Image: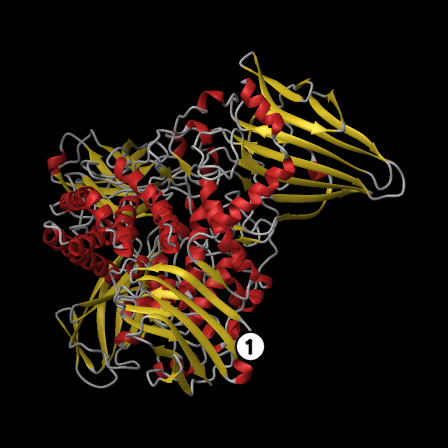
Amino acid sequence: MMHSNPRCSMKPFDIAPFALPNCSAGEIYFEEPRDINKVVLSFKGDPPRDLSIFYLQRTWPGVRYEEFRDLENPCVFGWFPGDDSFNTTWKKAGTRIRKEGKRRVAISFAELVSEFHDMTNYNVQFRRTLGIKVATGSIDRLKRIETYTVSAARASKIMVRLDAGRTTRCRTIELEGYNASIKRLRPLKGVSVENGSVRKLGKRPLFEVDLAHMEPAHRHCHDDGLVSFLLDGRRFTLSLVSLDREGPVWFEDEGVFITGSNEPKDFETYRERIKGLRTISEMVKERPEQSYRSACFGQPRPHPVNFNLGCKHNRHGFFLEANGDIILHKNNVTRVPGKDTPRFKCKGNARFMFNLERWATVCRFNDPSPSLVYNIHCRKFELLLEQKSLSVPLLKSIMDLELEGDDTGVGLFRFRFHNAGGIPATAALPVAYSQDFWRTWNSMDPGPERRLDRLSLIENRIYSRFEGKKALRAVFETTMKATLEGGGVLMQQRLEPGETCELLLKIPFIAVDSPEEIRALDGLRFDRCLSEVTEFWRREAGRGAQVRSPEPHLDALYKAHVAHVQISDFKMPDGSGLVNTSVGTNTYGNFSNESCMIIQELDQRGLKEEAERRLNLWVKYQGTATQPGNFTDYNGMYFGAAGFEEGAYNQHHGWILWALCEHFLLTGDEEWFRSIAESVIAGADWIFRQRRNTMVSLPHSRGWEHGFLPAGSLEDVTDFHYWLSTNCLTWRGAESAAQALEALRHPEAKRVRKEADGYRRDLIRGFDTMRGHSPLVRLRNGRWVPQFPSRLYRRGRDKGWIRQTLEGSLYLLLSGLYDNHSREAQWILDDYQDNLYIKPPFGYLIPDLESNWFCRGGFSIQPNLLAGLMPYLHRDEPEIYIWMFLNAWCSCYREEINAMTEHPHPTLGYSNTAQFKTSDQANAVMWLRYMYVFTMGERLHFGRALPRQWFEDGNILEAKDVRTCFGDVSIQYHSSVERGSITAVVKLPKSKATPQVLVRFRHPQKAAIRSVKVNGQTHGEFDPESGDVDISGFRGRIKVEGRF
């Protein structure tokens, strides 16, 4: 603990000196909302009588962070909104004014109910705000504004030791306070104090600092005292709260050790105490490599989730709840109008209900991958029930030419009853219907208000009414007796022991009514459709790159992923042939950032046309949709998708620009890129034009945002700030545009390159500035390292996992702005592993963390969206890459549907209802493929991160026809480790020049390579320890044999 004086003797701490500069007269702005309870005004002469106080207000008091249980439910906490200085407005405060002498006025706030009459349970006497405005006709006589918060003042002493563990490289140390003031510097040993600075003189330098600051009233009040140390200008910052709770602080990189005055001052004792501590990354490397079965069984067993049925590029998707209910989402056909839109005759979502939740579920499973056929098996006493479901087109075979996006789809649902008992039993299935229902959000009870339609029967057709007219809902085939009961239809049949009966329910997505459609519906035969659906998806999965591993779950999802994408992404109904990308089947629209992940996976799979049909949609609708932010125009901005665009994410533009250029750099298709080059240049120019808006003097600004994009929204968080991830990803788009235009030898390439490089310099300057002003964070090994905050003007951690983890400093590495091998990269990666991934409020709550970290750590909330494992692949740390990959995969993979959920939510083992989450899934299957084939600059790696366990004797590992910037490549490993060898067969393009090519052999017992043969000839270019064999210069089919 730091030494502190009694608080009763302390004067209140004035935070006005830490306000932002460049404010208008009578106004004071702060970097973060403060709980202000008192304002003191000093005037030239007598205070005016027309005084009133305004404060910036938007979400508070409706949103109160301290009440949101962020340590118990971090998932939900991530979405809560916050205030910013651009969207708040001035609200007049209820106040009490009291004179303090002749020229001073003290203003306190009235109870909150004076302004918000419903706040009787939160009747505080402070205002949480980013700013205060004094309103008076005599503003020119205002000399000073003092501002006080609810946090009590405190005095402390800290001890600073230099040359701790390494030499502190400086001559002079200056100190600055934020929410803190430096009262005295006292030299103790090896230093002198001159003009408020510490000068380093001798050995083991030591000095003491007296401070005044505040004791924060709660974790979200932003009153933490910060002390910055400038070592010959190099800045780092200490949080007095963190020192108090987690100290001492050892910043090993600069050789600085800081303690509270009444803590042990002996650095050597502290270093000995932490000697056995390890970071998470160090602990991973010390253990055997993670395996699929360990990751799977080390996590909670997931609860049941939904499945999806549909046809390629067709938007008539059927959402099959875990209890067998069927939902038809109205949004599928209304967001982008087509010929089907007026024929969806429902007020809202349609839902068929069968009460299967009242049966005991035996199992849920899909047919062998990649077939989109689903099965639910149930039992009620001696009766067995099997529901088998699939989807087909109405007017053509699924095997025919590609469907239109708005062609009619039909869901086929077969219910088969079997009496497995020894006495007669009655098979009964109720069929209820609603045209205005909702998902049950993983709860089988839809609630008391079922909002059911009254059904009618005409022969084998089921109808209800819409706007006073009859609408066909389903057709059925069965030997069961159909009767109307309770507004629904009841199917019944008596079964003798061993007997079976069936009901086939045919559900068109729209209310078909033409004779041709009715005949086609009657003519659909389940067995034939089942055979065609199985064959169709098998054929689709056979296109492009293939992967083979020893893990059946990995292979099954890899095969099925394309099918999941194809039924999620619909062909535009305008006849253009373009395809709109959805990032979650029957759930989400075109969130551009995540859509780019899907397209990147298709590209690397070799499905070039599929990628281009999605990319060209953004080119067509460039500049047609806006984003929330302080932008001056949207000419050239990518986001619009014909109304299917979704997500107030300013990063969308940078993602799309990057994806367009990445497609060209991967495929080398100059003709295609020339056709969109002007669009790409317009996209780059939008960036360059917008960032000039921050290259001028701005109000209430320190100028740190110079050259950044204007403030705007993030991802699911619409607070306007200068976000790190937005700017990193936007720069990556500009950088890719420069690279692509240079490769094309375009005349604008030089200008775009100059602008992109200038953007990079401004970003690095801004991010490094914020790193210096943000407090060090403690790692699990007892060291402290700098952090990069998620936005400018945030000195430290932000609110919730979205702002801090999902959109945090990792993007400095993922964008390429900072090198993956830099010291900054090490700080970022260790901070994520030790502090963000594994505990609230920035990661999942993991019970008994010290026992469960290995199987539940290493990923963000929404585990397969953030590519946190990729820097480890670049850094050649395969043990960590494998650990993160398998843990993230198993956290989201749902075995019973062979697909991934978006969120384990609110904790691991549970799910939201976004299945199939095709963007997160696309990342996961790419990360799987990168184990086999990965390019890095002018280097092509094979097997860089394949698990050692996979090389057990007899295993075959393969990645075939993977698209890279060097052409399509393949690798197949055959393990014969019991005979001392592993063989790899590599296929490289003959027509393209390839760079350095490395083939890695990872022996299951870590044995080193003793010798290598390439195409039967002895080969000396290999590294025995890493297992890399250099086959640069070879072409075509190459056989590489490693002996151990």
Residue 105 vs 852, above or below: the answer is above
* Image-based side of 361 in relation to 816, left or right: right
**Residue 1021: x, y in percent?**
32, 83
Q: 324 or 662: which is nearer to us?
A: 662
Q: 24 or 155: which is nearer to us?
A: 24
Q: Secondary structure at mark 1?
A: loop
**Residue 952: x, y in percent?**
54, 75
Q: Name the residue tied to disc 1.
A: 953
Residue with the most extreme top position: 468
Identified at 21% across, 36% down, the residue is 634
Q: Quadrant of residue 132?
A: top left
Q: Is residue 799 visible?
A: no
Q: Quadrant of the N terminus?
A: bottom left
Three-letter amino acid code of the residue under disc 1 = Asp
* Image-based side of 831 in relation to 437, left or right: left
**Residue 617: x, y in percent?**
31, 38
Residue 403 vs 945, above or below: the answer is above
Q: 96 or 706: which is nearer to us?
A: 706
Q: 386 or 837: which is nearer to us?
A: 386
Identified at 46% across, 49% down, the residue is 562
* Colour mapping used in the image: secondary structure
Q: Quadrant of residue 635?
A: top left
Residue with the most extreme right position: 423
Dot 1: few (<14), some (14–19), or many (≥20) neighbours within 10 Å? some
Q: Is residue 868 visible?
A: yes
**Residue 609: x, y in percent?**
35, 46
